[in-house]
Image: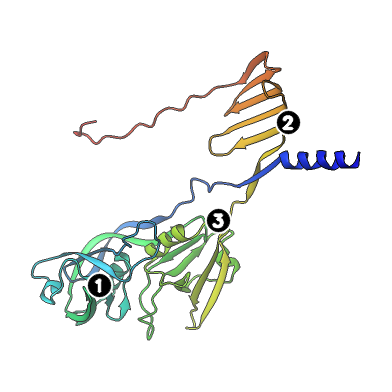
């Protein structure tokens, strides 16, 4: 009797299923650029150079290779006169490591006068220094206020001007912290700067926001090096915000089973699986429910809603 009870219990536990899934991030949680649309005069240095991300040749790797790739060099521009070519890698601008195009744009915007700037360039196996004299140009455009990451760290950052004596330690400056921000709970304050993220240079504000989405998932641990307003540095460890998890499957075969699919808004519940027929079963699809009793009686309740195919906007004059 005792052995039969233990065997039955083992079989019941083996047939028991319990699954929890992490809730998906709300659709409104995405990184975005906040821009002041007012037209303002803007002064920026120009060296006649276009660059792109120096992405790893292995698409499965998240590691960023140092520098940015030179994608275009304007004829007779400062960069061309300094000997730069398409295919070179720009590693540093005036002593500051350049890891993404946004940071180079920010550094150029902070050159307020005509002066000599040193570029560190890699070409093949050779690394050399090239001196350029940027041209100061002005234009009217909208001004980027901040880059916003709404989900995991809930932070708004911007590219800030170098501080005196800290030109080589730029880093995105924190300009806002959202509700339940892990950074705020760890003591990070507005005005402080992120100088390392997961052990790497965070790059520009745009690159930092992009890296958060690439390197973190809800609940992951993140390590940041923060530069305080007084010039002191400290390491901060936080846990990325997570929406939590919910029970999505519970059952003991062949007694009952309940299952809920979050992504497709489907669900099922049955009692008594007799292999060929179930004593009772209800399938849910959105607001519609389909009921079955003994496999003989069937009926529906609720409302079936058909999803329309998305309509693609076609510009005027373009072929659909």
Q: Give the residue displayed 36% in from the left and 81% down from the top.
A: 168
Q: Residues within 10 Å of mark 1 (few under 14, many from 20)?
A: many
Alpha carbon of mark 2 to alpha carbon of mark 3: how far?
Answer: 35 Å
Nearer the N terminus, badge 1 or badge 3?
Answer: 1
Nearer to the camera, 241 or 313: 241
Q: Residues within 10 Å of mark 2 (few under 14, many from 20)?
A: some
Distance from disc 2 to disc 1, alpha carbons, whole Å, reads: 65 Å
For the point 82% across and 41% down, which residue is it? Answer: 7
Q: Residues within 10 Å of mark 3 (few under 14, many from 20)?
A: some
The tag on residue 254 is: 2
Residue 214's x, y, as percent? 44, 58
Badge 3 marks a residue whose secondary structure is loop
Question: Residue at the spot x=16%, y=79% of the render?
Answer: 133
Residue 107 image position (x, y, % from top left): 29, 73
* Residue 90 badge: 1
Q: Which mark is residue 218?
A: 3
Q: Nearer the viewer, mark 2 or mark 1?
A: 2
Mark 2 or 3: in front is 2
Q: Quadrant of residue 281?
A: top right
Q: Is residue 18 above or below residue 134?
A: above
| Element type at mark 2 | loop
């Amino acid at each position: 009797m005792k052995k039969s009870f233990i065997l039955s219990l083992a079989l019941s536990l083996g047939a028991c299923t319990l699954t929890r899934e992490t809730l998906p991030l709300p659709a409104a949680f995405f990184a975005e650029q906040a821009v002041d649309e007012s037209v303002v005069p803007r002064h920026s240095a120009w060296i006649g150079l276009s660059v792109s991300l120096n992405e790893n040749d292995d698409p499965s790797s998240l590691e960023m290779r140092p520098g940015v790739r030179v994608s275009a060099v304007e004829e007779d521009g400062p960069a061309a006169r300094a000997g730069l070519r398409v295919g070179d890698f720009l590693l540093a601008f005036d002593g500051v490591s350049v890891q993404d195009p946004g940071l180079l744009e920010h550094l150029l915007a902070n050159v307020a006068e005509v002066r000599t700037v040193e570029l560190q360039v890699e070409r093949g196996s050779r690394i050399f220094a090239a001196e350029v004299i940027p041209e100061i140009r002005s234009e009217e455009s909208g001004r980027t206020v901040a880059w916003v990451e709404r989900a995991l760290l809930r932070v708004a950052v911007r590219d800030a001007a170098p501080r005196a004596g800290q030109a080589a330690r730029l880093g995105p400056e924190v300009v806002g912290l959202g509700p339940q921000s892990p950074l705020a709970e760890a003591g990070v304050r507005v005005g402080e700067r992120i100088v390392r993220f997961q052990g790497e240079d965070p790059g520009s504000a745009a690159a930092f926001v992009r890296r958060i989405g690439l390197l973190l998932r809800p609940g992951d641990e993140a390590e940041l090096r923060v530069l305080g307003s007084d010039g002191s540095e400290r390491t901060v460890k936080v846990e990325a915000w997570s929406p939590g998890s919910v029970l999505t499957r519970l059952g003991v075969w062949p007694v009952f089973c309940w299952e809920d699919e979050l992504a497709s808004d489907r669900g099922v519940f049955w009692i008594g699986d007799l292999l060929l027929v179930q004593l009772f079963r209800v399938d849910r699809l959105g607001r519609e429910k389909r009921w079955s009793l003994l496999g003989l009686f069937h009926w529906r309740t609720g409302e079936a809603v058909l999803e329309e195919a998305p309509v693609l906007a076609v510009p005027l004059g373009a072929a659909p």
